[in-house]
């Protein structure tokens, strides 16, 4: 379950977002002010294995 933490670059609010698919990250918005493109914060739990191939594929 990829749950990422984001920090809004506009209002500074931190929030978590559950990504159901790789493309979901494009839809992430601040839960407070609705600003797009929040900065992803590295959360405390990081998998030891290398990153899954997320990002290069585009769906539709
Ligand atoms: Zn915000």
Image (spheres, grey):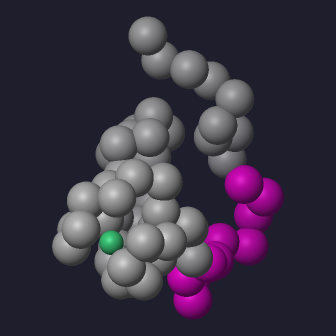
In which quadrant of the rendered view does residue 46 lie?
bottom right
In which quadrant of the rendered view does residue 2 lie?
bottom left
Residue drawn at (63%, 40%) of the image: 54
Residue drawn at (48%, 54%) of the image: 37
From the viewer's side, name the closer residue of 59 and 31.
31
State the extent of the magenta-drawn residues as a range. Answer: 42-51
Q: Dividing the image into 4 quarters, which one contains the N terminus?
A: bottom left
Evaluate whether residue 19 shows in this view: no
Q: Is residue 20 left or right of residue 53?
A: left
Evaluate whether residue 41 shows in this view: yes
Query: Residue reaching furthest top?
Result: 60
Q: Is residue 59 left or right of residue 20?
A: right
Q: Is residue 20 positioned above or below 16 on the image?
A: above
Residue drawn at (72%, 54%) of the image: 51
Could you say where residue 19 lies in the image, as x and y percent from the top left? 38, 52
Q: How many marks?
A: 0
Q: Is residue 50 magenta?
A: yes
Q: Is residue 53 positioned above or below 2 on the image?
A: above
Could you say where residue 21 lies in the image, as x and y percent from the top left? 41, 39
Q: Dividing the image into 4 quarters, which one contains the C terminus?
A: top left
In which quadrant of the rendered view does residue 55 lie?
top right
Residue drawn at (45%, 46%) of the image: 25
Q: Is residue 9 positioned above or below 24 on the image?
A: below
Q: Is residue 29 positioned above or below 20 on the image?
A: below
Could you say where residue 4 lies in the image, as x and y percent from the top left? 46, 68
Q: For the stretch drawn in magenta, what is the main secondary structure?
A: loop
Q: Is residue 6 left or right of residue 50?
A: left
Quick check: which quadrant has ligand 1? bottom left
């Amino acid at each position: 379950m990829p749950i990422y933490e984001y920090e809004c670059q506009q209002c500074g609010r931190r929030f978590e977002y559950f990504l159901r698919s790789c493309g979901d990250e494009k839809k992430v918005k601040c839960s407070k002010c609705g600003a797009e493109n929040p900065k992803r914060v590295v959360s405390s739990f990081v998998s030891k294995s290398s990153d899954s191939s997320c990002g290069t594929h585009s769906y539709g």
